[in-house]
Image (tube, rainbow, N blue to C red):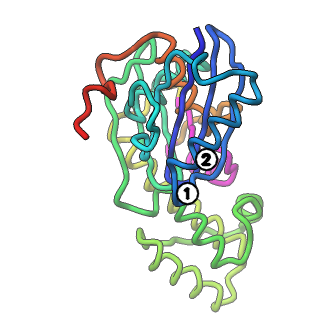
Amino acid sequence: MIVAGIDVGGKNVHIVIKKDGWILGKATDPAGINKAEAVEHLYDGILKKTGLARKDVERVVATGSAAKRVAFATAIIPDAAADARGINKLIPSARTVIDVGAEEGRAIKVGPGGKVLDFALNEKCAAGTGTFVETMSRALEMSVEDMSKVTFQSTQTLSINAQCAVFGESEVISLIHQKVPKPDIARAVMIAVASRVASVARMVGLDKDVVLVGGMAKNAGFVDCLEKDIQMKVLVPETPDFIGALGSAELALAGFVAEGIRARAEKVS
């Protein structure tokens, strides 16, 4: 059986195509303003690359904040369900999954088999998202990648208290004007994000193994600050930003259209 898992977030689209237990292909692109168009373009591209036609894909399961933009999806599932199933495929010992993307941060308590036992979501506070870091990186006039690297050069601990991106940017600019070294400011930003994410994770409980997924999982500076905050080792899979798409594909293979999943035919337009 050939299936597709599609994760449509606020910033990027990720697609995984699987045949039975094997990944045939995966791809990602910026979601842009017209997310439906971005999904169609990326999906057609990966099908062409893998030598498939749309009729060859028996099930398409979508997840993410803009999952409804996948007009051809067989079913839509919550992010937590996709994350839990995806990480269970890669790291079966995972019991706490922390997902930090561009717009949201969430923590999920995972049971055996990738079952969601509990979850908590941070969607109102910008300080717990990748967008907050991107905004601060522009204020520091460096890329997010460079910001992550210089975090390890910090020699003093500072605090950034703002949870709003606008006020946070004002704090960063003020520190720059005070001639505070950029590595110290960068680490203060990472600490602020890690603190907010950690507080969400504590709502569901931090049980080993703790796994970090989403785009921010590729930010080594953030990972370091998060580990120090929760005082636990954090595991990061090889492609942490594809976990939602992978989990969606796994659930498509399982034919899972029950708890936590709304078949498109059952949706109210």
Q: CA distance from mark 1 to mark 2?
A: 7 Å
Q: Amino acid at mark 1?
A: Gly
Task: Check if residue 222 falls in the magenta segment.
Answer: yes
Three-letter residue code for mark 2: Gly
Task: Say whether marks 1 and 2 touch (CB < 8 Å).
Answer: yes
Q: Quadrant of residue 4?
A: top right
Q: Which residues are magenta?
A: 210-230
In the image, what residue occupies the spot 68% across and 77% down? Answer: 140
Q: Can you identify the residue that label 1 sits on?
A: 130
Q: Residue at x 25, y 41 (%)?
A: 269
Please tell me whether residue 24 is drawn above or below residue 32 in the rendered image.
above
Q: Quadrant of residue 233?
A: top right
Q: Residue furthest bottom?
A: 177
Q: Relative to 143, is 40 on the left or the right?
A: left
Tell me the residue that label 2 is attached to: 215
Camera-side residue: 221 or 266?
266
Give the x, y percent position of residue 37. Answer: 55, 49
Residue 238 image-quadrant placement: top right
Dominant SS of magenta comes to helix
Of residues 132 and 184, the one nearer the viewer is 132
- Residue drawn at 49 percent across, 38 percent down: 98
Q: Secondary structure at mark 1?
A: helix
Left or right? Give the position of 144 relative to 9.
right
